[in-house]
């Protein structure tokens, strides 16, 4: 049993609360990703699971066992860090074998495991090399291999890809997913990169200031962010926000910004009606804003007039930075767009995907 459970776990460093009463479960064989900005308490959480950091309050369970007083080496956990240190004077083979040798595994078993893991990670040809003769990606693979040969029940990863270049990161991301399916172990993976989180996770846990802001399946969190923080953090480019109010006229609900007005579709009326008379923040994802002038573009939705400021083609789409009165907005539109800087543009907003938040509580309606 390799379920991991944190119950009301708090970590304080002096007067600084790094982790604030979090409750968290990584189910057996689940790929759980902790994601959040730098300093939000991800590493501290991981280190408490590994036993490298004591909890100030609360309990850590691995399987059914409370492990608060179990030393790291007895937790059957392997951890891969961002700054993985390989032994520079040892070959790849010896780097992989080192942990097993220390644990007095027989030579034949070591050989078997190292060969198996080298095969799994595609580094069989590198076994005789020294770390300095490897590329960054190869070194990262060896670091992972070192964790895998131990066949632990649980893997903890702390931003293992953040030292790699963009292309390699994408490749390793794919491999990590594959590896998880092969190993069938519980993984708790920490990253500040929301795209990494979205692509790898069975479930993501979004952290901010030591608190869990939301957890759920990646697309669930993307589609239904529970608060302003999660809405702004998950999704790239980030969600647009506007100060608005809701009005009802003759049974039609509208959202009114400083420079635009959108009719709320029937499907959202009941939910948004609760927000009447409140100060609100409207959220619109860039991918839900269309360039109206493109034939065959999104036909429904509501018009929104703006002025284009910057046009950024990224191949599959064009990112438009625009202004709507004093407010800025980002739109990801079809590459056929003819949008030009400083020109007026008419967008169509897919109002079925509007998000509404209370300005005070920051909670979603
Ligand atoms: N050993 C430590 N001593 C004092 N403060 C720490 C220590 N480790 C982490 N912190 C503080 O705890 C908070 C969370 O840090 P950390 O868990 O490393 O965040 P993350 O991994 O999300 O970037 C930060 O404010 C950080 O400065
Ligand atoms: Mg960290």
Image (tube, rainbow, N blue to C red):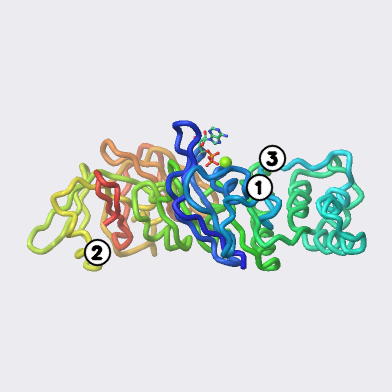
The image quadrant of residue 296 is bottom left
Q: Earlier in the sequence, mark 3 or mark 1?
A: 3
Callout 3: helix, strand or loop? loop
Q: Nearer the viewer, residue 210 or 339?
A: 210
Residue contact between numbered discs 2 and 1, judged by CB atoms under 8 Å:
no
User: Residue at 25% across / 49% down in the picture?
Assistant: 358
* Figure quadrant of the N terminus: bottom right
Q: Is mark 2 within 8 Å of ligand 1?
A: no
Residue contact between numbered discs 3 and 1, judged by CB atoms under 8 Å:
no
Q: Earlier in the sequence, mark 2 or mark 1?
A: 1
Q: Whole-percent x and y of residue 248?
A: 11, 57
User: Residue at 21% across / 67% down in the picture?
Assistant: 266
Q: Whole-percent x and y of residue 208?
A: 43, 44
Q: Earlier in the sequence, mark 3 or mark 2?
A: 3
Q: Compared with residue 276, is residue 323 higher up or lower down, i.e. above or below? A: above
Q: Whole-percent x and y of residue 24?
A: 48, 57
Q: Is residue 356 left or right of residue 162?
A: left
**Mark 3 or 2: the one toward you:** 3
Q: Is residue 268 left or right of residue 168?
A: left
State the mark number for residue 83: 3
Q: Which residue is mark 1?
A: 160
For the residues marked 2 and 1, what is the alpha-carbon distance in whole angstroms? 41 Å
The image quadrant of residue 29 is bottom right
For label 3, the crowd category at 10 Å Cα-Cα, with few meaning under 14, some 14 to 19 and many 20 or more, is some
State the mark number for residue 268: 2
């Amino acid at each position: 049993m390799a379920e991991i459970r944190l119950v009301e776990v708090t970590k304080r460093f002096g007067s600084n609360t790094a982790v604030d009463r979090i409750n968290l479960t990584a189910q057996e064989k689940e790929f759980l990703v902790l994601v959040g900005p730098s300093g939000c308490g991800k590493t501290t959480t991981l280190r408490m699971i590994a036993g490298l950091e004591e909890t100030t309050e609360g309990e850590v369970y691995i399987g059914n066992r409370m492990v608060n007083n179990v030393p790291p080496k007895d937790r059957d956990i392997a951890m891969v860090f961002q700054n993985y240190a390989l032994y520079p004077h040892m070959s790849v083979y010896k780097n992989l074998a080192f942990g097993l040798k220390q644990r007095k595994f027989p030579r034949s078993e070591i050989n078997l495991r190292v060969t198996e893991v080298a095969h799994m990670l595609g580094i069989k040809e590198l076994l005789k090399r020294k770390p300095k003769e490897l590329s960054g990606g190869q070194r990262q693979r060896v670091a992972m291999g070192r964790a895998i040969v131990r066949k632990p029940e649980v893997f903890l990863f702390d931003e293992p890809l953040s030292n790699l270049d963009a292309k390699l990161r994408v490749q390793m991301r794919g491999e990590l997913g594959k590896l998880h399916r092969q190993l069938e172990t519980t993984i708790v993976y920490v990253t500040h990169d929301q795209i990494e989180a979205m692509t790898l996770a069975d479930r993501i846990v979004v952290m901010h200031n030591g608190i869990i802001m939301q957890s759920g399946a990646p697309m669930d969190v993307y589609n239904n962010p529970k608060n302003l923080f999660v809405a702004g953090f998950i999704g790239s480019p980030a969600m647009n926000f506007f100060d608005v109010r809701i009005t009802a006229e003759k049974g039609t609900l509208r959202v009114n910004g400083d420079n635009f007005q959108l009719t709320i579709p029937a499907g959202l009326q009941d939910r948004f009606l609760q927000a009447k008379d409140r100060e609100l923040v409207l959220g619109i994802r860039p991918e839900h804003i269309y360039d109206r002038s493109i034939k065959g573009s999104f036909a429904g939705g509501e018009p929104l007039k703006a002025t284009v400021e910057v046009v950024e083609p990224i191949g599959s789409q064009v990112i438009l930075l625009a202004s709507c009165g004093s407010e800025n907005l980002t739109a990801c539109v079809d590459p056929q767009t003819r949008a030009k800087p400083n020109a007026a543009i008419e967008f169509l907003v897919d109002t079925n995907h509007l998000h509404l938040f209370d300005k005070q509580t920051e909670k979603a309606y």
